[in-house]
Amino acid sequence: MIPSAQATAISHLADAAVHDRLASAISLVARECPNRIAIVAGAGSESRHTIDYASLATAIASLEQQFDAARPIGIVARANRVESLVVIAAACGRQHVPLALLADDSRDLVGELRDWTGLDDSLALPTGLVPASGHEFATVPPHLVVATSGTSGPPKLVEHSWDSLLAAARLSEQWHALAWLLVYDATRWAGTQVWMQAMLTGGKLVVPASRDPDCVARAIAEEGVTILPSTPTLLRRLITSGDRAILEKAQLDRITLGGEAADALLLEQAHRFFGQAKITQVYATTELGEVFRVTDGQAGFPSAWLGRTLPGGVKLSMRRDGELLVQLSRDTAEVATGDLIERCGDRYLFSGRRSDVIVVGGAKVFPRRVEEILRGVPGIVESRVYGLPSAITGELVAAEIVLADPLPASATPESVRSESLAACRSGLEPHSVPRVLDIVKKIFTTPAGKASRRPTPE
Amino acid sequence: MSSPSTESIAAAIATAITVVLRDTGRDHKAVEPSLLLAGDLGLDSLDLAQTIVLLERSLGVDPFRTAPPSVPRTSIRTVSDLIGIYSTALIPHPS
């Protein structure tokens, strides 16, 4: 437990200037419990090692001293280790140095930030840095730049403020000193949310050595992870392929799903598997940040939410073509989300990204619907549906399936394959039935941990 | 890599069409070069698109998507037309 005086101090972080919060929180915990583990890196593997709060605080102070000596125009974090990103973000925040967090696949966007200084895991500023005079800016530089995940196109840079980055952080005492799993890329929006939340509240951030389901399972069980933020795709992989004996030792209190929509089957599996854990679905985008949360464990969101102002001021509506529109507050513009929704009883369900729609001979196909039918076939644990270019029909529906290991009694790969085509034929329009169906070992996911809707790269 | 023979191309096409018929739950028919794709085998445009994807995998080429498009599309009526298109794409000509 965190000593209560310190707990109160963390709860009052919300009163501190938003730039200072990360560094202040880490200093606070470092003072009270210097040896408390902040980060477990390489979890679930032999390379496991830990970093305590005192070391983080020392590294932050040392970087801040370097900023005093030579103030950069902005910092592009090029660090690979999460602990380095934490130190860079905390120091940049407290010293009001603009910061860009760029994932590997968006580093070629750095040209737009060519006057900024790169900072790697050495946490040493290059020597001979020309200090920024502060008078060179025609406009105020952005405080934070992050790249979008690029699910629906090439990654792009998005400007943020510390306010928007920390808007969803929860500082009250029930969130203190918890153990968080980081399966996301630490430089992407979803990842920053996890490590900032953990570091702001004296928590332990558990970073698995890889996304291999057995490694993730070991990290969860061995490090006592209580909060699992994940995409539905990564959670599905963990449940269907992770080592059962290890996963049964997991002590999860909460699963937070985001990044893509969760289907009813996955929610049911997760509930059965981690019965004690509360499952929250977060709807957020890199541009808007968090929009709403669904906590009732069902897919989609209640239909009563549409067209009404929700607590917090968000208003949801639907364009004629089914695209979800979001207005964050009365004085902001309505934003098209690119997500298509359809009503099903008293829920609105996500039918997919507008950009994921496959057009076969002029007819639309929603990959999610096909994926859900495939996942319902006994013997299939994962599926992915994408469009293949065709000179005859424009696109063709292609699918990949991962088979259960072991397969159900009397099933063979060939019988599962023909059964899944039969299931698609009876549940879908003819043009939606996959014309290419491959059995694969693993589903191809984007760096952000979402199912990709493109052909697998060679 | 040596270029395939007309016979091996014909065999690959027969296999692809058989897979398409099987995947779509239809009866297997012996695929003969003289058969009409639509009239005799019952292949629609989606079936043909699937056949072409399967052939791209087995023969390594999609002559319908190569530039410049050298395929007169109206002429694809029979299995033999398909064999001709793939042979043109795969077997080098002395000229």
Image: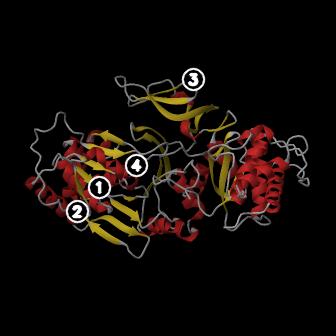
Q: Earlier in the sequence, mark 2 or mark 1?
A: 2
Q: Residue furthest front?
A: B95
Disc 2 marks which amino acid? Leu
Which residue does the numbered mark 2 point to in the structure image?
A56
- Chain ID at mark 3: A
Percent x, y of residue A241: 59, 64
Disc 4 marks which amino acid? Ala
Please tell me if label 3 and label 4 are on a single chain. yes
Q: Tell me, yes or no, whether the two marked residues, 3 and 2, touch with CB atoms within 8 Å.
A: no
- Chain ID at mark 1: A
Percent x, y of residue A128: 11, 58
Disc 1 marks which amino acid? Met
Q: CA distance from mark 3 to mark 4?
A: 30 Å
Above/below status of B15 relative to A433:
below
Q: Earlier in the sequence, mark 3 or mark 2?
A: 2
Disc 3 marks which amino acid? Arg
Which residue does the numbered mark 4 point to in the structure image?
A190
- Taking depth in this image into account, of A390 and A434 the one nearest to the observer is A390
**Residue A383 circle label:** none
What residue sits 81% from the left and 48% below the top?
B24
Which residue does the numbered mark 1 point to in the structure image?
A199
